[in-house]
Structures are given as C-alpha cells and as structure tokens.
Image (tube, rainbow, N blue to C red):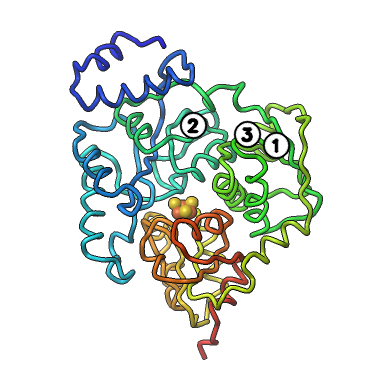
Amino acid sequence: MYLTPEEEKTLDGEYGRSLQKAIEILVALGDIYGADRLIPVKSAQIAGVSYKTIGDAGLEWISDLKGEVKIPSVLNPAGMDIARWEEMGIDPVFAKKQQEIIEAYARLGIQTKCTCTPYYLEGFDIRMDDHIAWSESSAVSYANSVIGARTNREGGPSALAAALVGKTANYGYHLDQMREPVIAVEIDCHLEGADYGALGYLAGKDIGSRVPIFYMKDMPSKDEMKSLGAAMAASGAVALYHIEGVTPEAVRNKFARPEEVITVERKQIDDVYETNKDMAATEIITVGCPHCSPKELEEIAELVDGKKLIKEMWVCTAREVAQRHPDLVQKIEKSGAKIVCDTCMVVSPAANRYSSMTVNSGKALAYVPSMCKVAARYASITECIKEAGVLDEN
Ligand code: F3S
C-alpha cells in the first residue's frame, strides 16, 4: 500500500506511540483487503462505548491512548442515560466505569454524544460520495444506502484509528465496484411503517453480507429505510442496499438487475409480527432502535397525547435530538413513557432486568433475545402503545 512521506513518519512513530498504533491498524486492514492507499474521511462514529460490551479491557485500551482526533467524531450508545442512570436502575459501579470510558474518549477530543443516528447531529451532515469511517451497523447502512456516503462497517478500534489519523484505507465500500448490487429482492405486496423492519429482519438472513437491490411497489420514507437497513444489518450483515428508483445511487447509476432474485410475500412479513406471540405478557415496551428521528418523536407524541400508559415504555433517542424538541419530550413523558438518551434497549444492562419486551424494531427483535436474554415480540408503533396499556387521562 502506498503511504505518503508524512504517513511513513507516523508509522515510524515520529508523532508518538498512539498515532503509530492507529496508523498500524489502518495499514494492516489496508494490506488485508488490498487497499492502494489511505484516503481522508470527513467524520468518524466510534462503537465500543458501553461498559456492558467492552468491559475493563476496552476501558484500559482507550485510556492508554494519547492525542487528539483530526475530524468530527462521535460515540455509539453507551450503557446508560448519562444524566438519568439512577432512574434506570443502573448499578453505581457500572455507572462509574461507564463515565470513565466516556471521559477517556473525551480526552481524545471525541464529542461525547452517544448515538447510533449521528446523521441527525449538527456537524455530521454528510453528503453523497463523502468518505467517512462509521462503525455502528445501522448508521453504516443509513449512511451508505439512504445518503449515498461511503463507509465500511468499521470496528470500534478501526473507527477510532481513522478519527486519530483523519484517514482510512481505501477498500470495500469506498470503491465503486464494491457498491454494485449482486442480489435482487422483489417485494410483491404493499408495505408501510413497521413492515420495513420486518422485511429487513427476513431479508437480512438470506442476503448475508452481500449488496441487495430492492424492487418494491412503494416509496419508503427515510425513517422506514432506517428501519429496513438496521434490521438487515442485524439479522444479516448488510452494510449497503439500494432501492430501485429511490436510494440515491440506484437513481444515479441505473444498476442492471442481478441474476439472483429472492421474493418476499405478505405472508412472510405477517409471520414476523407473530414471532413469540404466545410469550408471557410484555413487561416493557421499547422504541427508538435506531434512535428516534424528530419525526418519529412527533408521531409518538401524537399517539400518547392525553393518555396515561400503564406499562413501562422507553423511547430512545439522541440527547441532542431530545434537547432540540423539548415540547415533544414533555408530551411523551407526560404519558408516563421515558425519553431515554445516550443508550438503548440492547446495550444497556437495565434491559436485562425484564423477562419480556415488545419492540417496533427488526434489529431489536434480532438482538434483544441474544444480548439481553429477554424474550421479544414485534409490533408497529401503534400496537406498541396499545401494548403499553392506555388509560384515558380523564
Ligand atoms: Fe441503535 Fe441500540 Fe438499535 S445502538 S441501532 S438503538 S441496538
């Protein structure tokens, strides 16, 4: 792989051990995947934040690093709401470790906004064809597919390395030829709302890590595409998808229809809603996987307006998004639902206290049983709120 004289000096340790370690990671990945060079990236999103997932070894690794990131960089969700962890029932020992992880990242100049939807944040307005280094799988899918930016599915260490160096190795989804669809998915029915998460949950299993192109009757919204991509990244490992006539690259490039085709029928989508239908009564309802957009908060606020929920309900979103919409936060919390920031139902140990959960996310449906050991059921947002048990406020 070609390195500039400056990059060679970094690799030789002239700018310190941390930058040397960072560029070593990038060069090793570049060598494995046949990159020709390093390319500049516009922003980084770094996974490996929840103490639940990285533990003491991860904390030690981050704490040892010195220096300052060269590009706008942000974190993935942590294991707790940074401000309201006590209300979530988080153990103080866990909370202390979680704070230490966040402080270690902050010392490197990383913004301590913990979210899987960095594309809603100020300063992260990425555009088509921008090169970035993001690591949370749903954020990667959204950036590549809905925005048309270019990122590989980075691991926590490689995204952090890219943030410190300001570059990444030029391979995978940074290259035109790796972004072409190789499998077609035909949808033979109309879809709306949570149907897209159900579709992603199903299709991801067959697609694996390939690039699909969907042929569908409807024009999905950005939130619906967010749900589709998140679910496919969890049940499979899809980092980029196209929708004929909808997503930016499919519109620009007019891809040829791949030979391999799978078809999804209404009955298969309906079956996802039947998953675990006979599970014991739901103890908690969680929505906001990926973190809610302002539009989703608005929809939830309208649905719960003037109601009192009986069961516990979390609405997960980025703190910055919640702060920009205090009116919606207030309306939602008045119903008894909790706005949960910085974390989610999968990466927080607070979710492990429950035995059953209803979710409106195909990604959460795939991960909650394995990562939290909690039985999960799938429902639309309207059904989730019904499941929460609604009393009229009057
Ligand atoms: Fe985000 Fe957590 Fe879902 S990180 S995509 S809300 S599993």
Residue 380 shown left or right of residue 87 in the figure: right
The residue carrying pointer 1 sits among few (fewer than 14), some (14 to 19) or many (20 or more) residues within 10 Å by Cα, namely many
| Rendered location of residue 214, percent (x, y) | 72, 41
Residue 389 coordinates in the image, percent (x, y): 55, 81
Q: Which of these two is toward me, 29 or 374?
A: 374
Element type at mark 2: loop
Look at label 1 and name its amino acid: Ile
Query: Where is 383 relative to 117, above or below?
Result: below
- Under circle 3, the secondary element is loop
Residue 319 in the image: state x and y as whole percent. 37, 57
What mark, if any, has residue 213 been given in the picture? 1
Q: Quadrant of residue 128?
A: top right
Q: Is residue 335 above or below residue 193?
A: below
Asked whether residue 293 is in view, the answer is no
Residue pictured at 25% horizontal, 22% vertical: 20
Which amino acid type corresponds to the residue marked 2 in the rendered image?
Answer: Asn
| Image location of residue 238, percent across then percent down | 58, 39
Work out which residue is located at the far right of the displayed protein and give it.
188
Rounded to the nearest angstrom, the CA distance separating label 3 from label 2 is 13 Å
Q: Residue at x 63, y 38 (%)?
A: 241
Disc sitting over residue 210 in the figure: 3
Residue type at tag 3 = Arg
Secondary element under disc 1, as helix, strand or loop, is: strand
Q: What residue do we see at 19% from left, 20% from top?
A: 15
Tell me if 135 is positioned left or right of 204 in this view.
left
- Mark 3 vs mark 2: in front: 3
Residue positioned 21% across, 42% down in the render: 60
Residue 152, disc:
2
Quarter of the N terminus within the rendering: top left
